[in-house]
Image (cartoon, grey):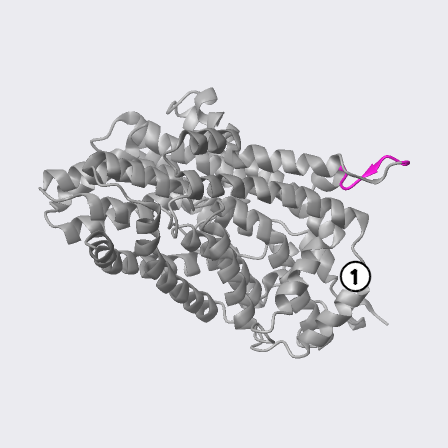
Amino acid sequence: MTTTDRPPQRTDVDAAFRGSATYRSLGEQQLSPAEERFEKGRRTVGLFLAPVVTIVFALLPLDLPRDQHLLAAVLLGVIVLWITEPVPIPVGGLIGVGAIVVLGVVPADDAVGPLGSTTVFTFIGAFILAAAMLKHGVARRFAMAILSMQWVGASTARVVIAFGLITAVLSAFVSNTATVAMLLPTAIGILSVIAKLMQDKELVRPDFDPLRLRVGVALMLMLAYGASVGGLITPVGTPPNLIGRGLIEEATGERIGFLDWMLMALPICALMFVALAAVLLLLNRPEIKRIEGVHEYVRQERAQLGPVSRAEKNTLIAFGITVACWIFPGVIALVAGTDSDVYTTISDRMDEGIIAVLGASLLFLLPTDWKRREFTLNWSDAAKIDWGTILLFGTGIIFGSLLADTGLAETIGNSSADWLGLTSTFAITVFAVILAIIISETTSNTASAAVVVPIIIPVAVAASINPFVPALAATFAASFGFMLPVSTPQNAIVYGSGVVPITKMIRSGISFDVLGALLIVVLLPVMVDLVLSV
């Protein structure tokens, strides 16, 4: 039998998910001829377009300070590299950081300083916890529990929606990043079950690529975007909420209570979730509508898993302690309020990044065999986490801080407001939402809120308009930014799964950006009038 006559080798689904990465060369993927032509064209165009865009913009005669002008030029080139992927996406960010230093925008130490952000440590700790959950089968047990829910049944759409609801509710009280980090292994577990079921029922080729399933894209993006939607429900759901609320209260003297915030946000978030489910399931239509035989399959898999092992128990202990510590500041906020000294002290000391690395450290302390000094996780397992995603988001933080520090974000906001001549509440609200979304695409949500809300308040005051609604709209919109992996930590985490191609994230993200913006602009003024007029 010749090599070409051999039957295709059966894909090891579990190994495929454990070895996933943010960037795969063309040779590492199974592409159709049309897909391969598109990928080659996209990456070739980007290789030449990125430097051209950077050089041309840098040479334009713009009335900008030198550091802002060069930063904008480099950032545009980096965005082209991120979108077209001629080089691995993390490398594109590193090229941009190097260019900023070489061009003299900022000194090297100032440029790389933001890499020490606690968000980076959140990624490291969460990825190590996820590695243990995947290695020891904990993620698979969680996945089986969700798939066996009576309401979910055998519908792939219901699996995606149910998982999104769980994510949204959790992220209302736990940070979005922490929520996605804790649920990512379960999402991978669910996807691996669906992929194995499709493989066993011969619905796919024996050598299929489980990382290229559309249902995987829908599930992963539901995890990331659902957390952003749920984070808007309470003031403590995400840092931009606290930043925006504080700035609004300082500027207007109107206090937004915890319950008032929830009453305003909940109807908007509910409609956002419906829009999100529609967008993701239409643009990433699952390969199969019904997972036939899923309950029998789940029963068989649970029987094979057997009783909970010592390694699983240790992983659950480390995971449980980490989650409890992540939730604790939110509980204090509910009891004592976000203005209390107790909440301030606890939230400062129980930083989610520090909690993540301490929780991950427990995996190297809890033994599975004390006599042989074997522990729950070894360093060779931990070293395999996706460092590319960590580097990618680190460079995103660098660009976000530079946009604020150089004043480029403020220049963009003020120049746009002056040029547009905004004079009505509606116009300023629309501008606030668009500006916040655009800035949040290339910076963190926190940075977007910290930059945009202080711009919107004086713009509204100058037009003799109460800044409450426009500033609150900017706060909500700062949690958007769904197009790129660097837009939010949630996007970066799910991109690190290797399941979501950058092109599909952009297509789904821009669709939801537009729908979310419309919902904020139309519904937020109505909810503010209803809640605060009572």
- Whether residue 205 is visible here, answered yes or no, is no
Mark 1 crowd level (few <14, some 14–19, many ≥20, 10 Å Cα): some
Give the residues drawn in magenta, as a range: 371-378
Query: What is the residue that sits farthest to the right in this orientation?
Result: 371
- Number of marks drawn: 1
Q: Residue at x 71, y 67 (%)?
A: 207
Q: Residue at x 54, y 62 (%)?
A: 163
Q: Residue at x 21, y 45 (%)?
A: 468
In the image, residue 377 lies in the stretch drawn in magenta = yes
- Whether residue 514 is visible here, answered yes or no, is yes
Counting from the top left corner in percent of width and height, residue 452 is at: 28, 39
Q: Secondary structure at mark 1?
A: helix
Residue hosting label 1:
305
Above or below, 458 relative to 172: above
Q: Where on the picture, by quarter, is residue 301? A: bottom right
Above or below, 187 relative to 334: below
Mark 1: amino acid: Leu
Counting from the top left corner in percent of width and height, residue 59 is at: 29, 34
Q: Residue at x 69, y 72 (%)?
A: 197
State the quadrant of the C terminus.
Answer: bottom left
In the image, residue 111 lies in the stretch drawn in magenta = no
Nearer to me, 147 or 189: 147
Identify the main secondary structure in magenta.
loop
Q: Is 302 situated left or right of 86 in this image?
A: right
State the quadrant of the N terminus.
Answer: bottom right
Q: Where on the picture, by quarter, is residue 288? A: bottom right
